[in-house]
Image (spheres, rainbow, N blue to C red):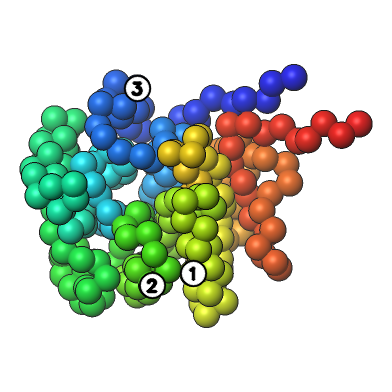
Amino acid sequence: MSAMQPVPSPGHPAVAAYLAEGYDSVPGMSSRFAAAISARLLRLQTEQGIGGPIAEIGAFEGRFFIALAHALEPGELALGIDIFSWPNPEVKDRFEANCLKHGIGPDRRVTVKADAGAMAPADLLAHAKGAKLRFIHIDGEHSRAALLKDLALATACLKDGGLIVLDDMLHPGYPTLMVAVQAYLEANPDIVPLCVIDRETIVAATKFVLCQKSWFERYQAAMLDIFKDQVWPLGADFEPHWCLVLSQDTRLAAIT
């Protein structure tokens, strides 16, 4: 019997319209399911009184970035950070053109051509007009060293109640990234996994969402209601921490 669940509501009409009509037209790898979950988490933050700018490290041509930016409140900024050199230098122009085409004008975003791994927290915060960030999506260089640098930067710039989202977790092409995440969690006991967003395909890969330990119970209680149809029953065991797994396929193995 199928247990495939629909993509949940992102909680924002503009995000829903973009996911339905524009998402696939922008080159990129992140899944529509993960974009909807992330946008709804941004809405949850707003409902909890958490506002402010967001950032994406590894914005590429803007597919995921545009969805996040549409989930912001008026006056909040989205920072798109990338070296903007792959596959060619024109990728920055394509990023900005895609943002403009899909409704994210220069008044709503800041394009940052930089290596996040070489940025100090003060540099990132300066791009955010001095405000700490409420949501940081990390999809930069896929090496252990680079991920640890990005995580350190994100942690230093995260506001109270903020979320860090990690792309391409448990990806067969990047198996050592999980080693970096485990080392980071052990070194930062005040940060815990909030949920795992299951992959759609090998390309549209799994994401981890991290939060401050002091916010875990509040977030989890709300998410159990918001995403009740997408909760995989067994969850994720990070030894000893347990968190939700959100998936479109909520089946358990048929062993009887």
Residue bearing mark 3: 20
Instruction: Let me know if residue 63 appears in the view.
Output: yes
Residue drawn at point x = 31 percent, y = 27 percent:
24
Task: Tell me the SS state at disc 1.
Answer: helix
Amino acid type shown at disc 1: Ala
Q: Nearer the viewer, mark 3 or mark 2?
A: 2
Q: Which residue is mark 1?
A: 180
Q: Left of 55 or right of it: where is 223? A: right
Residue drawn at x 35%, y 73% is 149
Precedes in sequence: disc 1 or disc 3:
3
Label 3 Cα crowd, 10 Å radius (few <14 / some 14-19 / many 20+)? few
Classify residue 74 as left or right of residue 17: left
Assess whether mark 2 and mark 1 are in contact (beta carbons under 8 angstroms).
Answer: yes
Separation of residues labelled 3 and 2 (CA atoms)? 36 Å
Give the residue type at disc 3. Ala
Q: Amino acid at mark 2?
A: Ala
Q: Position of residue 144 (x, y in %)?
A: 42, 68
Q: Which residue is mark 2?
A: 145
Q: Earlier in the sequence, mark 3 or mark 2?
A: 3
Query: Mark 2: which secondary structure?
Result: helix
Tell me the CA gap for discs 1 and 2: 8 Å
The one nearer the camera, 220 or 141, is 141
Quarter of the figure with the N terminus: top right
Q: Position of residue 187 (x, y in %)?
A: 52, 80
Above or below, 224 against 48 in this view is above
Could you tell me if the residues under marks 1 and 3 are in contact, i.e. CB atoms within 8 Å? no
Occupied quadrant, residue 104: top left
**At which x and y percent is residue 22?**
27, 25
Kind of element beneath mark 3? helix
Q: Residue 151: percent from the left, percent from the top?
A: 39, 69
Q: Label 1 neighbourhood size at 10 Å, few (<14), some (14-19), many (20+)?
A: some
Q: Residue at x 48, y 62 (%)?
A: 177
